[in-house]
Image (cartoon, grey):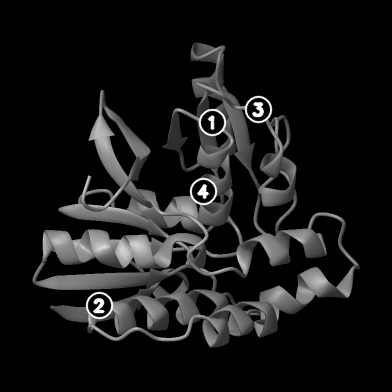
Amino acid sequence: MRTSRLYLNRLNQAPDHIDAVVVIDVLRSFSVAAYAFAAGASVIYPVETVSEALFLRAAMPEAVTTGAVAGGDAAPGFDFGNSPTALQNADLAGRPLIQSTAAGVLGLTRFRHARALFAGSLLFARATAQALLELNPDEVCFVITGEWVDRDGDEDVACADYLEALLSGANPDPAPYAARVRDSDFGRRFLAGTNPSLPASDLELCAVADQFDFALRAEHRGGRLELQRYRPGG
């Protein structure tokens, strides 16, 4: 199984033919998605813009919204920001979630035509690797979304490195990868305590390996992109 990497910040156009893609956003889009499912969300609809999310919520009164604009501030008019702390104790039992973020969700929508498309985060990296090993694609492309002009994106690169090691058959210690999430440019902003939209508790909830036993797979249903929990071997 070959692996490759692309950086969303450097990408002009997504390649036409990719077998399997893992769009990685550790801080925080897909960590939020994992905690949303743990809180009972039935499905997640990733949509590219805030206006699209609000339009979809108007058509789905039972849905809740989560997301942020570039930089991490909560999207205006949303029920939740892009914060696992806010969702950790939420009751979303049976409710659909609409998610819009400037990095992770954008990456998913850019690669929506991949044969197999997964959201990636350290929280469920081992389950994602197991799901990919079951599919056995010729190539897995890791899409790094956290790199920006002022951020090294190493939280996502660390997750890609961990996934790559797992796919190669290794059984690495996850602790160094979690440490890289905390030590990344963006991770240190959560510890600085200068931005209320970036609480340190979010970093602690995201910088954990293999907290959940499910992967997050994106598929087309009813004309929309959906994220669903996928348990390998199930």
Say which label, 3 or 4, has the lower sequence index: 4
Q: Position of residue 4 (x, y in %)?
A: 25, 80
Q: Check disc 3 and give the amino acid type.
A: Asp
Q: Check disc 1 and give the amino acid type.
A: Gly
Residue at image mark 1:
40
Residue at image mark 4:
34
Neighbour tally class for label 2: few under 14, some 14-19, many 20 plus, Cα within 10 Å? many
Say which label, 1 or 3, has the lower sequence index: 1
Q: Are marks 1 and 3 in contact (CB under 8 Å)?
A: yes
The disc label shown at residue 167, or none: 2
The disc label shown at residue 100, or none: none
Spatial CA span between label 4 and label 2: 21 Å
Q: Check disc 4 and give the amino acid type.
A: Ala
Spatial CA span between label 4 and label 1: 10 Å
In the rendered image, the vertical position of residue 103 relative to residue 86, given as above or below: below
- Element under label 3? loop
Q: Check disc 2 and give the amino acid type.
A: Leu
- Element under label 1? loop
Say which label, 4 or 1, has the lower sequence index: 4
In the depicted view, which residue is nearer to us: 97 or 91? 91
Spatial CA span between label 2 and label 1: 29 Å
Spatial CA span between label 3 and label 2: 35 Å
Say which label, 2 or 1, has the lower sequence index: 1
Neighbour tally class for label 4: few under 14, some 14-19, many 20 plus, Cα within 10 Å? many
Neighbour tally class for label 1: few under 14, some 14-19, many 20 plus, Cα within 10 Å? some
Residue at image mark 3:
91
Q: Are marks 3 and 2 in contact (CB under 8 Å)?
A: no
Visible residue check, residue 13: no
- Element under label 4? helix
In the rendered image, the vertical position of residue 37 relative to residue 153, given as above or below: above
